[in-house]
Amino acid sequence: MGTITKTYNEAVAKAVLNGLKANEKSLPSWLFYDKKGDKLFQQIMRMPEYYLTDTEKEIIVNNRDNFLEDFKGKDKKFDLVELGAGDGTKTEILLKHFCVQNADFRYIPIDISSDVLEDLEERLSKRLPDLTVLPKPKSFYDALDDLDNKDSKKRVLLFMGGNIGNFTLEDATDFISELSKRLRPEDELFVGFDLKKDPRQIQSAYDDSNGITRAFNLNLLERLNDELEADFDISKFEHYPFYNPETGEAKSYLVSQEDQEVCFGALDEKISFNQWELIYTEISQKYDLEMIHEMAEKAGLKIYRNYFDRRKYFCNVIFKK
Ligand code: AVJ
């Protein structure tokens, strides 16, 4: 045998094989966000059915003065630490407002992707040249553990955009507990939760009539075709979102339309699918206040404040120890 040069990403290959060789097939939702997936997600956020972005934006715009008061430490200073840099539009509204108000704060975005952080830093240096930005290209926990604890300045951790929804309830509780361990008495944790509402409205948010969410879900398979030399026939899979109002779980699946076999050229592997077999690709957990209270209690946190949009579709919560 000659030397095989691997051109694929090991983490992607491992996640894909793990997920597709399991009894109940799944693919992790972080795989959505390649170049094309990022673009599709931007488009999803502009779909009339996808209410999440505008509702959280409404909360931020209407309460930016309150947030500044909530976030300021005793000495008026604070560090704003964002978990996941994301696309940053909503954060930018806050940052801009805080700069205009001459707040004494620094912005510390944490993201595993240094590319994402470089783009963000470049954008912010143009738009908000006076803002101090300290990007940390690390995992959330590593980055938080790395922060200098001799620095007594108040910290506010941000986890916005309903990203907590991509965890199951159990995993979200563990995650919040881990963050809680790293909070000091004066610190705060600011989280955006998408709330339970008319089940039909949630269902259509993940099944928009322009088919963008469908394309977003199917793009996972195209990504595997490109990166792992797989031969998925995209027309033989269908997007199926399902919202369960009993549990608040909105889950998305790809459904195999027939018995079929898929080869992964780069991995020298074959995976077979039965007709109607599912690949579970995403959870978007919806919350009610009782669930948020219970989570806070389990994580050893108190709800210091909660903010809603006028329709109570979304809730931004400030937790404290
Ligand atoms: C980025 C996790 C908030 O779950 O609503 C949108 C991702 N997936 N449409 C969500 C998503 C399908 C989104 N979050």
Image (cartoon, rainbow, N blue to C red):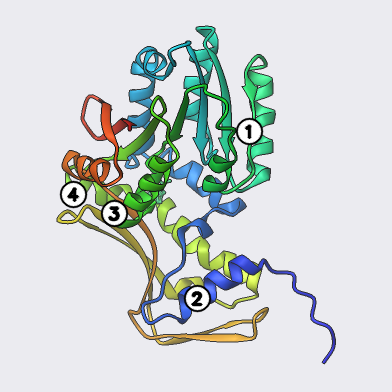
Vertical order, 56 against 246 (above or below): above
Q: Which one is nearer the viewer's eye here, 306 or 97? A: 306
Whole-percent x, y for residue 26 in the image: 42, 71
* Distance from the alpha carbon under mark 3 to that under mark 4: 18 Å
Tell me, for residue 120, which label it has, or none.
Answer: 1
Vertical order, 238 against 50 (above or below): below
Mark 1 or 2, closer to the camera? 2
- The reply to whether the residue tagged 4 has its Cβ within 8 angstroms of ligand 1 is no
What amino acid is labelled 3 in the image? Answer: Leu
Residue farthest along the bottom direction in this orientation: 1
Name which of mark 1 and mark 3 comes first in the sequence: 1
- The reply to whether the residue tagged 1 has its Cβ within 8 angstroms of ligand 1 is no
What amino acid is labelled 1 in the image? Answer: Leu
**Is 232 placed left or right of 292 in the picture?**
right
Q: Mark 2 points at which residue?
A: 18
Name which of mark 4 and mark 1 comes first in the sequence: 1
Whole-percent x, y for residue 6 in the image: 75, 73
Name which of mark 2 and mark 4 comes first in the sequence: 2
* Distance from the alpha carbon under mark 1 to that under mark 3: 30 Å
